[in-house]
Amino acid sequence: MSSPGHHRDREAPARCCSYHTVQRRLPVLRWLPQYSLWWLQLDLLAGVTVGLTVVPQALAYAEVAALPVQYGLYSSFMGCFVYCLLGTSKDVTLGPTAIMSLLVSSYAFHDPAYAILLTFLSGCIQLAMGLLHLGFLLDFVSCPVIKGFTSAASVIISFNQVKNILGLHNIPRQFFLQVYHTFQRIGETRAGDALLGLVCLAVLVGLRAMKGHIARIHRVELLSVRISRLIVWATATARNALVVLFAGLVAYSFQVMGSQPFTLTGETPQGLPPFQLPPFSKAEANSTVPFSEMVQDLGAGLAVVPLMGLLETVAIAKAFGMVSGLPCRFPGCQSLRSSHGEGTAVNAQTGVCTPAGGLITGTLVLLSLAYLTSLFYYIPKAALAAVIICAVAPMFDARIFRTLWRVKRLDLVPLCVTFLLCFWEVQYGIVAGILVSGVLLLYTIARPRIKLSEEGVLLMQPASSLHFPAVESLRDAMHRWALAVSPPRCVILDCTYVSSLDYTVVMGLADLLQEFQKRGVTLTFSGLQGHVLQVLLSADLEGFQHFPSVEEAGK
Amino acid sequence: MSSPGHHRDREAPARCCSYHTVQRRLPVLRWLPQYSLWWLQLDLLAGVTVGLTVVPQALAYAEVAALPVQYGLYSSFMGCFVYCLLGTSKDVTLGPTAIMSLLVSSYAFHDPAYAILLTFLSGCIQLAMGLLHLGFLLDFVSCPVIKGFTSAASVIISFNQVKNILGLHNIPRQFFLQVYHTFQRIGETRAGDALLGLVCLAVLVGLRAMKGHIARIHRVELLSVRISRLIVWATATARNALVVLFAGLVAYSFQVMGSQPFTLTGETPQGLPPFQLPPFSKAEANSTVPFSEMVQDLGAGLAVVPLMGLLETVAIAKAFGMVSGLPCRFPGCQSLRSSHGEGTAVNAQTGVCTPAGGLITGTLVLLSLAYLTSLFYYIPKAALAAVIICAVAPMFDARIFRTLWRVKRLDLVPLCVTFLLCFWEVQYGIVAGILVSGVLLLYTIARPRIKLSEEGVLLMQPASSLHFPAVESLRDAMHRWALAVSPPRCVILDCTYVSSLDYTVVMGLADLLQEFQKRGVTLTFSGLQGHVLQVLLSADLEGFQHFPSVEEAGK
């Protein structure tokens, strides 16, 4: 969890190289010395359970990212090991997520070289953001933007898998084209894939519902009850692995019998790729794509992927790490969590003790890469599609539209902009959403509400601070209500709610004072806060008059 | 004067095609029917006087823009005629200005084709801004940015003319290179140019000072006094024309005597260029530069030039149009005015009656194009340089640094950023200044001041409204002061100064309420304004408690 700046309030002044500092930078040192056998048992149980969820999901997310299936596994184990050394929150597991896979699919163009470079550069950018204390940039991604994006992502990813459930091939990546081609070619549906996919979906939904209904295991109950409950719980928790295993067995039986009604995953290379630097250039048929061109191809991905990556990690860590007192930066949006909160949620439920649980999970992934790749051949794509759809469907939040309508209608604008544009291109949706919420924010600042009332003279009261873009709006209001009427009217400007003034506002007020003087009326100030008054006095405005309260000003 | 939206408050509901509507769109119809001989006399006097200022300045500004000298005149007459039809403010004259010339020089690359295309596209963009009601964008150019830019422009333009006064050739355009080369080659100074330039400067400064000291002409005084005063006034007002004329005569005499100690303006084509569409492509030695490439070459100029153009026009119109009750959008920055306020100021002083004064000025420019171009040959560049330096020197405002130090130190940041970066490239300075003031603005919004005090429990009072980027800061403060301490503390959040809440803030508060509940302490709200309370109630927060005042909440 690398939210820049969120450790701020825990940073007591410490000597540079003390053991405490090293411990803070390398949190593994905090728990490793106290590690016990009992912890190992719990971590082992949690690690294996998470592994059974992570492995099938890794295969599935590779499909979402439009990359060869083994890349899902490659990206699953590294995070486990690194986080074990550097992580602070025992519940978090790092790995591929549906959202990230979707984003990567927009930039990787089915080419692992691009995906690897994007991952590497995103890491560099996140690191730079941390070092430069740019974490506050995340504050400018508002809740409606995140909700809009995750809801759209849920729809996009789910629909993207419909083609696998129907057994259709060569469907384009773009959402609208995908919808068009999927429905146009719905007649080509392969019965085997469709049947298997629907069965898997039904089983997954059923198991998930069941899990929600198991009561907690209590020590006082009969052993048989406890054991049967544990079995149900384990089945429900490892449902992804079970469904994939079951589907794979069915496919294998058909293969042995000489027919194959399912679309299979196919060959997966065994073992690990060589450990090497990311590809800074790329050899093509008869030329080389240089680094600069690859970076240009990645384009907006280099901003969107690191940003969303940080947001996602922080969202998860906050949801589960909060209990340990970590203040995390993320405005209360639950939706990102469900996307890779699965492993994390399992961790929390199985009572994981230390980040060592991640070691077990990582080892499991490595083992599956070493020994199971030949079996991955038989996994039907329809089963993976069912796993994906079940994982991402909860990210769709239909209630948010009603909630925003009730709570704050203006926030529907960034929500809808993000939601709708995401179907065109995910990054356009996010960027447009951030821009729209930024513009709305600036607009409210540029056009503060000004309350008008009559107290003998005209009383004008800005409802919030006056920043430089608001000068024009204030001037307009003064002209409309006091100077452009005949005869011109005296005004009391009640600054009770004004907590800061900048130079542009001060100059605007100076101009207004002059204009009032020219028209033979007065502009009086009241309710100035201490430092605001100081700013106005230091500017030495001609004709500046102020009173502590409206009553005294009105006399 | 085309500030989009500034007519807002004068737009009474009117039928679409009534005479009144036509009149509003074509203001010439307002004054033309009542035009009288007396008005004509006044307009004639004003028009001629302005013309005597405009013609030499037009020649000089063409030099600033690095364009052939006749382009200054071309751009001077069109504005006069168009404004005469469409203008509302009788005092305004439209034409080339020092600032615009400097900006154009950055994008035109000594090539009129680019300058013309830039002008045309800038007009289109300004028109579009008007139609789309984007005038509020101007509000985001703060006073310090404008001050920084105009002060830098004054230095850049003045120094740019030093080479002409010294008679140096082939000095590069970039400011720093210019400084370097000018000083390096100061030994090559041509005595004739330097002497003439300094004399012209001295005369101009002297005449300007004189003009400031003439008392108003009163009818009661003796005719001889009145006439002598009028002569002094006319000399001082037409000083640019007189100095250029005098310098030209000197140069001509030398020419006739067979020697030429001055660098002259040289050949100027007579008459007008053919009336045609702007060049949408450009023929070069052996290829054509297409439209798209030209637009790309203009680059940031297409944002900077229309924006600064609007700002400048609006600034002038405001300074002189205010008296006629036009509310104009411009935060009180006087500095842009002096750059083309010259003609406008003269207009105001000579008692111009209607925009018809512009007709006379325009005709004068046309006449000089028709009959005087052969004489322009003899105008020494040093004299034009003196005219320019005198015109732009007043734009430098040294006091602003001290004023800002006194009034609002934070505003020194955008001022200095703009001022210094302008020396590198003018557009970088403006864009960086706008961005810096925007970031400072967003920062103050993202990090509102929160006042802490003890009222039995902890009392937290945000000093201004809470917008979505502020959630994190609020959460951090709550953690630091209430949740991360042991034992955790109860908090009253006093929202007296909070005038709006968005959904992200509401969700952040919901999360905080949960966290407080988990720790067994309470978070209570007080002083909620009506609609803020409504938003919070509609969000249906768990554990939400509010009291009208801090005292009641503290009980």
Image (spheres, coloured by chain):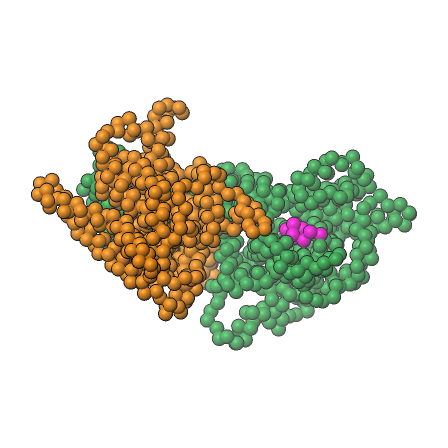
Chain colours: A green, B orange
Occupied quadrant, residue B408: bottom left
- For the C terminus of chain A, which image quadrant? top left
Q: Which quadrant of the structure image shows residue B152?
A: bottom left
| Relative vertical location of residue B6 with respect to residue A324 in this rendering, above or below | above
Residue B378 location (% of width, % of height): 34, 53
The rendered magenta stretch, by its main secondary structure, is classed as helix
Residue B93 at x, y = what percent?
32, 41
Residue sitting nearer the eye, A22 or B285 = B285
Q: Is B187 on the left-hand or right-hand side of A372?
A: left
Would you say residue A224 sits in the magenta stretch? no
Work out which quarter of the rendered image holds the N terminus of chain A and state it: bottom right
Q: Is residue A248 left or right of residue A101?
A: right
Residue at left offset 17%, top offset 47%: B231
Q: Is residue B230 visible?
A: yes
Q: Is residue B519 visible?
A: no
Pick whichever, B31 or A420, lies toward us. Answer: B31
Q: Is residue A104 magenta?
A: yes
Taking the image as shown, residue A326 lies to the left or right of residue B333, namely right
Whether residue A357 is situated above or below residue B527 in the rendered picture:
below
Seen at 23% across and 53% down, the residue is B208
* Magenta region: A100-110
Q: Position of residue A177 (x, y in %)?
A: 68, 40
In this picture, residue B114 sits left or right of residue B325: right
Residue drawn where x is 64% and y is 65% of the image? A82
Most foreground residue, B397 or B122: B122
Q: What is the x, y in percent for residue A35?
A: 64, 70
The residue located at (32%, 46%) in the rendering is: B55
Residue at the far front: name it: B257
